[in-house]
Image: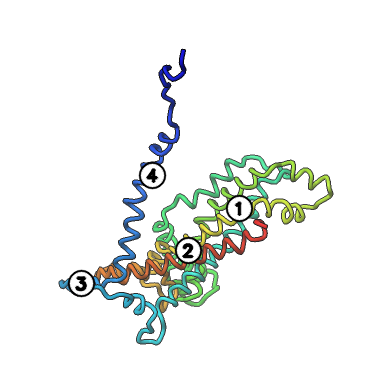
């Protein structure tokens, strides 16, 4: 029989079904993420705010909003740079201990030499602070460290201080409290990520290092750390992006004022001020675009710096 006369069999187009399955993600992303991002960039070039009951704009002003962000105020300081500096300081104070402690705990719990039992229990315990809402966590610390709170009462009762310490009115103490809260909330999540990364390393690598006579420090720096680099880079970059978007903890702890002297005012708190009573969408859009550019630039810089030696 001529093959040309045989009926053609219809095969399953798996590629088509693959596109169909991922289509909902792209539709959702375009509607709820990409479109608002484009509108934010668009609004950043317009004067659009409310003055009392009067709506001003939208009027196209070009780069005027961006120029205003980097113009000195009445005190001679540039608010954008000040709040960006605050955000970086608060992030470093919380993220550096977070990464170090999480890395040490991850190595400790996954050590093939120590063979720690009950890892699931420890994972649950260290992750629990991450389940507490940041607002509730901030209110707890606000109550503990207020002038009439239990911390001051203990210090007064033991004669350590003569009068109540205004922890929330001192620049150093406020920054320490904010950083401590971020550390307590996120070190458990980071520990679990790093533990998963270490458990994904072939155990034969550790056994071979032990046979060669390597001690614990040599195994950590020559085997664990290089092979853990992809997860570690991911953890640091995501922590940095989250730190640049820090808002809820300092917002609740300082009642949105960034006290004292705006020393704890972060970039997103600054952005939120424009979305308050004035509804200044133009300036808010400009702040958002600058924050996006800074986050993207720092992420690329950190990625290239940390992964350069492992990509050669």
Q: Secondary structure at mark 4?
A: helix
The residue most toward the left is: 53
Q: Position of residue 99 (x, y in %)?
A: 59, 59
Q: Which mark is residue 230?
A: 1
Picture quadrant where residue 286 is located: bottom left
Q: Position of residue 165 (x, y in %)?
A: 47, 74
Badge 3 density bin: few <14, some 14–19, many ≥20, Cα 10 Å: few
Q: Is residue 1 left or right of residue 95?
A: left
Please tell me which of labels 4 and 3 falls first in the chain. Answer: 4
Q: Secondary structure at mark 1?
A: helix
Q: Which mark is residue 57?
A: 3
Please tell me which of labels 3 and 2 falls first in the chain. Answer: 3
The answer to whether the residue labelled 3 contacts the one labelled 2, judged by CB atoms less than 8 Å apart, is no
Please tell me which of labels 3 and 1 falls first in the chain. Answer: 3
Q: CA distance from mark 4 to mark 1?
A: 26 Å
> Residue drawn 81% across and 51% down?
214
Determine whether 86 is above or below 131 in the image.
below
Q: Which residue is mark 2?
A: 296
The residue most toward the top is: 1
Please tell me which of labels 4 and 2 falls first in the chain. Answer: 4
Comparing 32 with 10, the one in front is: 10
Q: Which mark is residue 25?
A: 4
């Amino acid at each position: 029989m001529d093959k040309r006369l045989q009926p053609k069999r219809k095969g399953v187009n798996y590629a088509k079904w693959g596109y169909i399955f991922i289509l909902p993600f792209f539709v959702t992303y375009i509607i709820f993420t990409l479109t608002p991002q484009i509108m934010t960039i668009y609004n950043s070039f317009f004067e659009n705010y409310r003055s009392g009951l009067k709506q001003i704009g939208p009027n196209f002003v070009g780069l005027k909003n961006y120029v205003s962000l980097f113009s000195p105020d009445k005190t001679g300081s540039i608010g954008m740079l000040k709040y960006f500096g605050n955000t970086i300081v608060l992030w470093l104070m919380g993220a550096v201990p977070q990464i170090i402690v999480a890395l040490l705990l991850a190595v400790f719990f996954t050590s093939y030499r120590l063979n720690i039992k009950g890892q699931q229990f420890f994972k649950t315990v260290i992750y629990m602070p991450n389940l507490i809402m940041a607002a509730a966590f901030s209110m707890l610390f606000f109550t503990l460290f207020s002038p009439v709170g239990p911390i001051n009462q203990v210090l007064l009762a033991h004669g350590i201080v003569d009068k109540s310490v205004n922890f929330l009115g001192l620049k150093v103490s406020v920054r320490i409290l904010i950083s401590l809260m971020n550390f307590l909330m996120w070190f458990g999540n980071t520990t679990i990520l790093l533990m998963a990364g270490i458990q994904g390393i072939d155990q034969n690598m550790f056994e071979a290092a032990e046979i060669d006579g390597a001690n614990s420090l040599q195994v950590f720096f020559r085997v664990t750390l290089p092979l853990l680099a992809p997860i570690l880079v991911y953890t640091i970059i995501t922590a940095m992006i989250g730190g640049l978007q820090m808002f809820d903890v300092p917002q609740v702890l300082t009642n949105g004022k960034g006290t004292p002297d705006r020393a704890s005012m972060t970039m997103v708190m600054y952005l939120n001020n424009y979305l308050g009573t004035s509804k200044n969408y133009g300036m808010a859009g400009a702040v958002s675009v600058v924050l996006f550019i800074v986050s993207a630039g720092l992420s690329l810089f950190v990625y290239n710096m940390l992964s350069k030696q492992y990509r050669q």
